């Protein structure tokens, strides 16, 4: 019964682990045997194991040598068995390393880390976002889930690739969704807008079902799907069509200005902050609060009051309790 349990456990181990166990066992057996046969030449079992390792690996330092015929026979058996076993171990280790690299690039390896960001969907926006994220903080751990890519080399993009359907819990678990810090879901360019939104919303549902607290940022193309994305559990909903339409409108009616370049430079160099009006600014006019905040490198550009956005309001606008201040600050 004990033998059956051993076989059941042993043959379920990875090949590399089985080889290591076997090599260690063989070296211990030969080291113990040679110590018993020639205790004068090999005073301790460890001396015997040392001899077995250097002999089996064909290094042969010569510091320990069997003198009896029986000892030499043991040495020949060790060279024939142990040497081949160690050679096979080295070959298997190299093959396992190459296979692991192949599996990693093909998205077959589960992510074991934590405090990482998960990106869903590979496209030009994702590529640029990954570049900017790593430029901002090179230590950021990123996991990419995509079912259209067949291969992604870590040397080209330092992200952990998971090949699979992000709506499937199995692949979310492979991405270690429970210990991630953020999820960004981008629209699938290979689908039409309705299908892309449906897939993004279904992915949001799957993510929220596996992690109740994680912030989810999702890209929605159709305005009539925004509420569905919110009900699915999205914390932030990006509307690229609305954004691009507004920029195009400004480009059409610009007056010696560069709206697109201005917005890009603003987002590259500055970050937008929202925070509730501090008590020290209560009932103060907008212009005074703008001046005070600028002293701390915050540029006040507007407020949110009762859900209504007021950008560049009148300078005499009095700020009241529960106003949300909109500021920009350097990265």
Image (cartoon, grey):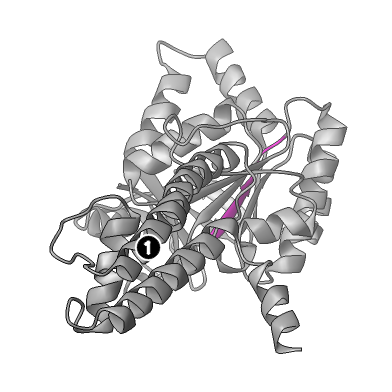
Q: Is residue 67 above or below residue 141?
A: below
Residue under the image location 42 percent in, 34 percent down: 131
Where residue 299 appears, as percent x and y from the top left, is 31, 48
Position of 323 with respect to 35 (left or right) is right
The residue that label 1 is drawn on is 73
Q: Give the x, y percent position of residue 161.
A: 58, 43
Compare residues 249 and 40 and report the one nearer the observer: 40
- What's the residue at 67%, 80% (across, down)? 6
| Secondary structure at numbered mark 1 | helix
Can you say whether 123 is above or below 231 in the image?
above
Residue found at the very far bottom of the displayed protein: 1
* Horizontal side, residue 49 vs residue 273: left or right: left
- Between residue 256 and residue 286, name the one nearer to us: 256
Specify whether 156 is left or right of 180: left
Examine the rendering and report whether any part of residue 329 can be seen.
Answer: yes
Decide which of 109, 223 is in the foreground and name it: 109
Relative vertical location of residue 155 with respect to residue 165 in this rendering, above or below: above
Q: How many marks?
A: 1
Q: Quadrant of residue 240?
A: top right
> Considering the image in quadrants, where does the N terminus appear?
bottom right
């Amino acid at each position: 019964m004990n033998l059956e349990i051993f076989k059941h456990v042993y043959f379920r181990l990875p090949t590399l682990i089985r080889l290591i166990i076997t090599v260690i066992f063989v070296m211990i057996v030969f080291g113990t045997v040679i110590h018993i046969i020639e205790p004068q030449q090999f005073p301790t079992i460890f001396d015997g194991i040392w001899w077995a390792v250097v002999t089996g690996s064909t290094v042969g330092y010569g510091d320990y040598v069997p003198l009896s015929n029986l000892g030499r026979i043991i040495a020949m058996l060790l060279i024939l068995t142990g040497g081949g076993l160690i050679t096979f171990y080295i070959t298997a280790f190299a093959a396992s390393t190459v296979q692991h690299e192949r599996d990693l690039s093909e998205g077959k390896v589960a992510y074991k880390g934590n405090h990482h960001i998960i990106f869903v969907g590979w496209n030009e926006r994702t590529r640029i976002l990954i570049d900017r994220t790593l430029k901002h903080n090179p230590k950021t751990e990123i996991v990419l889930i995509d079912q259209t890519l067949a291969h992604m080399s870590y040397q080209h993009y330092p992200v952990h690739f998971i090949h699979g359907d992000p709506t499937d819990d199995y692949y979310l678990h492979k991405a270690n969704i429970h210990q991630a810090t953020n999820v960004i879901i981008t629209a699938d360019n290979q689908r039409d807008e309705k299908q892309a939104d449906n897939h993004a919303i279904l992915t949001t549902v799957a993510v929220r079902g596996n992690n109740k607290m994680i912030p989810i940022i999702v890209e929605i193309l159709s305005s009539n799907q925004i509420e569905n994305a919110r009900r699915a559990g999205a914390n932030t909903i990006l509307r690229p069509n609305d954004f691009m339409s507004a920029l195009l409108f400004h480009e059409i009616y610009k007056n010696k200005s560069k709206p697109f370049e201005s917005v890009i430079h603003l987002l590259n160099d500055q970050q937008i902050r929202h925070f509730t009006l501090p008590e020290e600014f209560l009932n103060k006019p907008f212009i005074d609060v703008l001046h005070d905040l600028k002293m701390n490198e915050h540029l006040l550009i507007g407020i949110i009051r009762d859900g209504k956005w007021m950008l560049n309001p009148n300078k005499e606008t009095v700020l009241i309790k529960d106003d949300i201040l909109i500021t920009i600050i350097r990265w």
